[in-house]
Image (tube, rainbow, N blue to C red):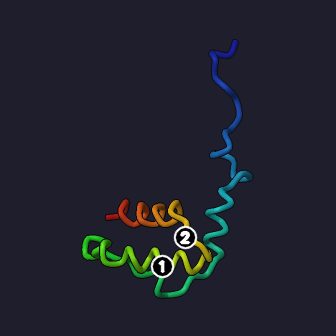
């Protein structure tokens, strides 16, 4: 009898089910300036928050507090 073990492979082990996002990121080309790492300990977020708010509002065409707070949280998380 089988001892409760499953036979076969999982999706992670099978190369037919690869990570599509990872594969797509390898194909994309980004500008060289985006390859440089930023030391977030040297960035004063309080100074750039008004600029971020203004820029996000310009891009979206309206002020969206959820998106702006998301950007802030992403920047603060790395600090």
Q: Say which quadrant the N terminus sits in.
A: top right
Label 2: element kind: loop
Q: Residue at x 61, y 81 (%)?
A: 29
As drawn, the residue found furthest toward the front would be 62
Q: Quadrant of residue 44?
A: bottom left
Q: Quadrant of residue 9?
A: top right
As drawn, the residue found furthest toward the right would be 16
Q: Looking at the image, do the residues carrying marks 1 and 2 touch, with CB atoms under 8 Å apart?
A: no
Q: Residue at x 67, y 26 (%)?
A: 6
Q: Position of residue 49 (x, y in %)?
A: 38, 73
In the depicted structure, whether residue 64 falls above or below residue 29: above
Camera-side residue: 74 or 37? 74
As measured in the structure, the alpha-carbon distance from the residue carrying label 1 to the one carrying label 2 is 8 Å
Q: Quadrant of residue 76?
A: bottom left
Q: Position of residue 28 (x, y in %)?
A: 64, 77
State the mark number for residue 54: 1
Residue behind mark 2: 63
């Amino acid at each position: 009898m089988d001892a409760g073990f499953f036979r076969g492979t999982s999706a992670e082990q099978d190369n037919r089910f690869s990570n599509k996002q990872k594969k797509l990121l390898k194909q994309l080309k980004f500008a060289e300036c985006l390859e440089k790492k930023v030391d977030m300990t040297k960035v004063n977020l309080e100074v750039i928050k008004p600029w971020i708010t203004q820029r996000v509002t310009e891009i979206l065409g309206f002020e969206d507090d959820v998106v702006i707070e998301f950007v802030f949280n992403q920047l603060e998380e790395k600090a």
